[in-house]
Every structure is written in C-alpha cells, then in structure tokens.
Image (tube, rainbow, N blue to C red):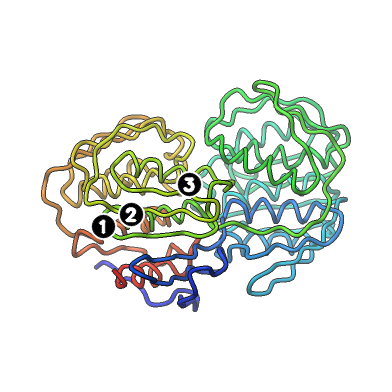
Amino acid sequence: MAAPIPGPILGFRGRAVPSRGRPGGAGGRRAIMRGMTVVEIPGSKSITARALFLAAAADGVTTLVRPLRSDDTEGFAEGLARLGYRVGRTRDAWQVDGRPQGPAEPEADVYCRDGATTARFLPTLAAAGHGTYRFDASPQMRRRPLGPLSRALRDLGVDLRHEEAEGHHPLTVTATGVEGGEVTLDAGQSSQYLTALLLLGPLTRTGLRVLVTDLVSVPYVEITIAMMRAFGAEVTREGNVFVVPPGGYRATTYSIEPDASTASYFFAAAAVTGGEVTVPGLGADALQGDLGFVDVLRRMGAEVSVGPNGTTVRGTGELRGLTVAMRDISDTMPTLAAIAPFASGPVRIEDVANTRVKECDRLDACAENLRRLGVEVATGPDWIEIRPGAPLTGAEITSYGDHRIVMSFAVTGLRVPGISFDDPGCVRKTFPGFHEEFAALTAGW
C-alpha cells in the first residue's frame, strides 16, 4: 500500500514571511501577496557542498550564510568533522575552521550517506593531507560510479584503493599530499569528477592541468570556478584543458543562493495550474545553470520574468510540446517529464544519458511512472519522449529512493488526483520540508 504524504519531516514547518524576506535557509517559506506567491527556496545543495570543501581547505575561519540543511549537506559536514575539521552550525550560518594542510585526524572512517558530492569531494580533499582515510556510503551511493575520478587521482600519485567493486565505494585513501601535474579525465558521466579535481588544484604543490575528454553539466563546472575565485583561487581554460595554479584558498564570508533545481518544481507548479510563483534570490546573476529551466517553460507558453533579484513564472493555461536538449540542466529533466502529459503535443527530452547514473536511472524511472499513470512514453539511450493525449489516472509513484522523482511527480499530482508515493520521505536528501511547503503553496491558489 502506498505511503501517505507525511507530515513535517525532520521537524520542519514552513512559515509565512514578507515578500522581501531573505532567500535560502533551511526550508522553504512563502508569502501570498496580491495574488502572487513568493517562495523562499532552501539553499543550493551544489553550492553548499562546494562551499564546505572550500571553507575546509581555506586559511582561516569561513562563515557560510544560509547553507542548505538537508541529509546530504549534514552528511558532508559530519564527514568534515570526522576528518578533524571544526564545523559550527546555527540555523542560518555555519562556520568552518579551515586547515590548508589537510585533515587534523591522522585516521578516520567517513560514512558519506547518499551524497554524491560528499562521496566524491571528501576523498579528494583528504588526499591533500597526510593520513589514512576510509570512505563508505549507502547502498544507493555504492552503486554510483566513481571510476574516472579514482583513475585521475591515481594518475596524480594518490594511493587510493577500492575495497570491493573497482570504481565504487568503499575506498581507502592513504594520503601523503598531492604533487600536481597533468591528468586526463573523462567527465561524461558526471561533472563532479572535474569539480573535485579543480577544487584540489590549489592544494597541490605544483598545480594541475586537467585535460577533459568529455563533459556534461557544464554550468556546474562554471559554479565551481566562480566559487573558487570567491575563495581566492583562479582557474583558466584553454579549450578542453583546465589549468589551476597552486596557492591555496583564503577564508571568507559566503552567502548560499537558493537551489535552482528545487525551484523548478515550484515554477512548474505555476505553469501547470495557471498560478504565479516568484523565487527571490535567483535572478539574472545566479550561478546555477538549472535556472535555465524557466526558459523551457517559456518555450512551452508560460510567462517568465528574470530580474536582478528574483524570477517569476506565471501559468497562462497553455503548455506546448517541444523538443529540448537538457545535457546542461539534466537535474530538471524529471520536472519536465512530470508536466509533459499536460502539453498540447509531444515533449521530447534529448542528450540526458547521464541521468541514468544518478540516484536511480531517472530516464527509466520517469518512463515507468508515467506509463503507470496512463501516458504513452518512448525512451532511448539518452532520450525520452512523452506523448500526451490519454486520460490520466492516479497511481502509486515508485520513487527508487530518489528525491527528484518524488518532487517532480508531486507537480503531476496537482492535476491528477490519487497520486501517492512509496517513499515520500526521501525528499529529506535536499528539502526536508518539501511536502508541507508544496501543500501550503497550492492551497493559497
């Protein structure tokens, strides 16, 4: 039997704030003013993880303002603490005592939970220190690939040993610092491999040159480079070669912007219901490429306004079909797939092969759940095509433990009664208060 949508997860309850309230924070907040709903989205998971790495590696004490508090980021902070970094946490800010020389502990056993950034970034950070560090992760994360990053680190002289399946957790790093040099990397499965090496670069003795043979999700790499600059390091790009000089990082105060991937569910909700949503803190200067999802909604017929301090989407009652390549914003692929049944024509999403190696195979997960609702769907190695027309019926959505599947199909549920989830609580990975905030949002329309 399907599990009901839960009450508050991890104790969070949303609360109304003024429309000019602060962005980010631990959970969504909303205010309905003159028919417009203002939603404060929690801080970016991607930015919070990078900021924690940079703060740990920096010389001095860094303050992170409004970081995301979720299972993934708490796991990252816990991993830092296991390695011997001091992380002080309050509701709206975290302080990290940086250690440019690497982990304080000579030995540590770190559990990375479900977090891909935790599982890929922390072993790389530990490699720059001196000691023996073991990393393990959840069964879900154990299945996700690490091989290209492991090979690159070994090519740089890092003693990294996989204990069971090659290219997967658990693994042990016996660290003696990293000299640096030139390395070749295949980042066709995940841009996180390249991000991990770029973050490592300033901690090496001679710097890094990384030749990338394939790369997905380029905007995430651009986030990394911009954040490294904010912490005092520079990256240059020469075609497919990324060059990072040595020199370390300097501590700073860094504000975390709202999560654009999470915002996609609220923007999509407006598009399919005729509502209007504004997300402050995600404007024209936002770091995250996933804000580009609103351009997809604009192409489908929604009204979109991206200003200097926020973005607004208003549904017009029209959703057109389209063909769109989402290689660079693939985390929002499930969001588009979940609203595609309400389009006036087929929706074809292309160039998203890397979504097959996320928390689950998201292409197949979306296809199977849409078929369960009565939608005609076709898939290929790197594409999915959704063909609207058949009447939709409520069903249990199989989450595969993937937060993005649940949050995406919650949007479908705004138009299709009777949708439930086998594991609604998996949203705690990135947005513990999602169900409460989403229900409160739609109740206001």
Instruction: Give the residue at mark 1.
Output: 274
Sequence-earlier tag: 3 or 1? 1
Q: Position of residue 292 (x, y in %)?
A: 46, 42
Sequence-earlier tag: 1 or 2? 1
Q: At label 1, which amino acid type do we have? A: Gly
Instruction: Give the residue at mark 3.
Output: 291
Question: Mark 1: few, some, or many residues within 10 Å (few <14, many ≥20)?
Answer: some
Q: Specify the quadrant that holds the C terminus.
A: bottom left
Q: Is residue 194 left or right of residue 353?
A: right
Q: Secondary structure at mark 1?
A: loop
Q: Position of residue 216 (x, y in %)?
A: 53, 33
Q: Which mark is residue 314?
A: 2
Q: Secondary structure at mark 3?
A: helix
Q: Which mark is residue 169?
A: none
Question: Mark 3: few, some, or many residues within 10 Å (few <14, many ≥20)?
Answer: many
Q: Is residue 68 above or below residue 386?
A: below
Q: At label 3, which amino acid type do we have? A: Leu
In the rendered structure, are the residues bearing label 3 and label 1 in contact, judged by CB atoms less than 8 Å apart? no
In the rendered structure, are the residues bearing label 1 and label 2 in contact, judged by CB atoms less than 8 Å apart? yes
Question: Mark 2: few, some, or many residues within 10 Å (few <14, many ≥20)?
Answer: many
Q: Specify the quadrant that holds the N terminus.
A: bottom left
Q: State the CA–CA distance, disc 3 to disc 2.
A: 15 Å
Q: Position of residue 48 (x, y in %)?
A: 63, 56
How many marks can you see?
A: 3
Viewer-side residue, 114 vs 187: 187
Q: Secondary structure at mark 2?
A: strand
Q: For the residues carrying marks 3 and 1, which lies nearer the camera in this image? A: 1
Q: State the CA–CA distance, disc 1 to disc 2.
A: 6 Å
Question: What residue is shown at x 26% (from left), y 56% (from top)?
Answer: 412
Sequence-earlier tag: 3 or 2? 3
